[in-house]
Every structure is written in C-alpha cells, then in structure tokens.
Image: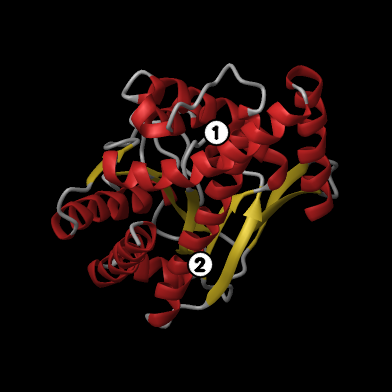
Amino acid sequence: MGLQKNVKFLYIVVFALCLLGTNSLINRAKAHRKTLKVSTVQERTVKPFSLVVIDPGHGGNKLGAQGRVSLEKDIALQVSIKLKERVEKEMPGVKVLLTRESDIDVPFYERTALANKNHADLFISIHCNSADSERRVKGKNGRYTTQLTRRPNVKGTETFVCGYNRMAQQDVAIRENADILLEENYKENYNGFDPNDPSTYIVFSLMKRRYRDQSIKLATMMQDEYVQSGRENRGVQELSLAVLATAGMPAVLTEIGFISSPDEENFMLSSAGQEEIVNNLTTSIKRFKTSMER
C-alpha cells in the first residue's frame, strides 16, 4: 500500500511539473505541506472541536438486524439519543446532531451530507451486529424455503473505518468542504489555499490520509473503552461501507454488540447496558477531542 501511495504521489508531481515547472512545483508542494500543518493549528483556533454527528443505523422500513425480541433500528436510536444528551451535558461547547430522531429511513448519502454541510468534526454511526445467517434450501417437494442458522454464542464489539476502495469517494466531500470554507475567511483558515492550483491535489491527498488516521485513532479508543468495561474485543476493522464513504471528516461505524446473542440483546435493551455503552462512547469522544487539541 505504501508503494501505491508513492506511485500516486509521483503521478501528481509529474502532472503538475508539466503545468507549473520544476522549481514552481517544488516550492508550491513544500508550501502546501506547510500550509496543511499551519491550517491544522489555525483550524483549532478558528474552528474548535464543536460538532459531532451521530447516525442511528437503519430506521423506517429498514429494520436492520433482528433479535429475539428487538430490532437493531430501535436500539441504535435509543443509544444515539442518550449519547447526544450525554455528550452535550459533559462536553460544554460541543453540539450533537442526529441523522434521525425518530423511526424513519434516511438514505446513506443524506446521513453524511448532514455532517459535511455542517462541517462536523466527527461522524459516528451506531449499529448492532448479528451472527445469524439465512440461506435458501430446496425441499423434497421442489420448493425453496428460508433456513435460519443461529449463532447465539458470538459476542463482542467491533468498530469499522472506511475501506481503501471507498476512499476515492471522499474526494468530492473534501473538495466541497474546502469550497465552503473558502467562503468563510479562507485566507485565515488555509493561509492562501487555492483550489484552482493543480498542486492543491497534494493537500487533498494528505487530508484524506489524515481523516483515515484519525478515524482509526477514534475507533481504537472506542474499542479500548469497551474492553475496559469487560466487553469482548473484536477489534478495529476495515470495510467498504457506503455510509462512511463520503464523509469529509473522521468517521467510524461502531457495532455495540450482537443482537443475535440473547445475553447481549438483553444487555443492549437494558438501561444499565445502554448507560455503559454511552459512557464508553462519550469517554472515547472526549479522549479524541483532547488528542486533537494538543
């Protein structure tokens, strides 16, 4: 993967060389690398960590995974509402937006569009996992029926970041965000950042890499907090997830437990269980915010 990144970077450099000339590109590339570092510091001053978008998975006619007595869409919404209340209570100056506040279906693109439009600092999608599986089985009468295989012993939490094959879709979000920021004191925010300059694409590449690194950092913090509470750790995973693909900020999808496990389903339905999960997620957001403001 490191080789692919280097090849991509060299391609950008060669392309820009043809347009700008060797000395011009080198100077601009160095300047943009410095600009990214400077703008990161300036963003902390001009735009402090202030907005988290929480996405309750599924909703409406999209039920999500089904347990014995509950649905994923309902647990995800309950936990998300409680998480919003906790974050806003314990983190002064931080606002939380929910992608849905009731039992409705929200298309994937609208979920991240909300975060992009409001320049969110984080995007967190809340889900429940399932180890159950279905398959079509042909009976003796020639008719097919659906056979459910249950795996009640599979437990634990895991948190996902966007797979590399989806990362190209972030380009549009990053550019759109940059365009909007340009309308709001862009000289102060980006130190003369110019979207019409071909070498600017180096900055986009670095921003995308930074979002991925920060997403992995947040996901790791979440898993650490789950483990501290005694939950089974299934780790940080990479997956091709549409809901994360166009997020122009650090973004994760966290599976708070297996609804297919009666024990974990009961835990996620209980007040104590939801309280623990909310504590874990709130602490990880606080830790992430602190790490970004150092």
Compared to residue 266, the image places residue 173 above or below, namely: above
Q: Residue drawn at (77%, 42%), measured in percent from left and top?
A: 144
Q: In front: 76, or 266?
A: 76
Quadrant location of the C terminus in the rendered image: bottom left
Q: Is residue 177 left or right of residue 141?
A: left
N-terminal of the pair, mark 1 or mark 2, is 2
Residue 255 x, y percent position in the rendering: 49, 59
Residue 57 x, y percent position in the rendering: 43, 44
Please, what secondary structure does the residue beneath circle 1 have?
loop
Q: Which residue is mark 1?
A: 246
Q: In front: 121, or 19?
A: 19
Name the image quarter holding residue 30.
top right
Name the image quarter holding residue 213.
bottom right
Q: Which residue type carries mark 1?
A: Thr
Q: Which residue is mark 2?
A: 220
Please, what secondary structure does the residue beneath circle 2 have?
helix
- How many callouts does the rendering have? 2
Few, some or many residues within 10 Å of mark 1 (<14, 14–19, 20+): many
Q: Which residue type carries mark 2?
A: Thr
Compared to residue 136, the image places residue 184 above or below, namely: above
Would residue 1 be seen by someone viewing this image from the given angle? no
Q: Residue drawn at (40%, 81%), measured in percent from left and top?
A: 228
Say whether marks 1 and 2 touch (CB < 8 Å): no
Q: In front: 158, or 294?
A: 294
Few, some or many residues within 10 Å of mark 2 (<14, 14–19, 20+): some
C-alpha gap between disc 1 and disc 2:
21 Å
Q: How is the image coloured?
A: secondary structure
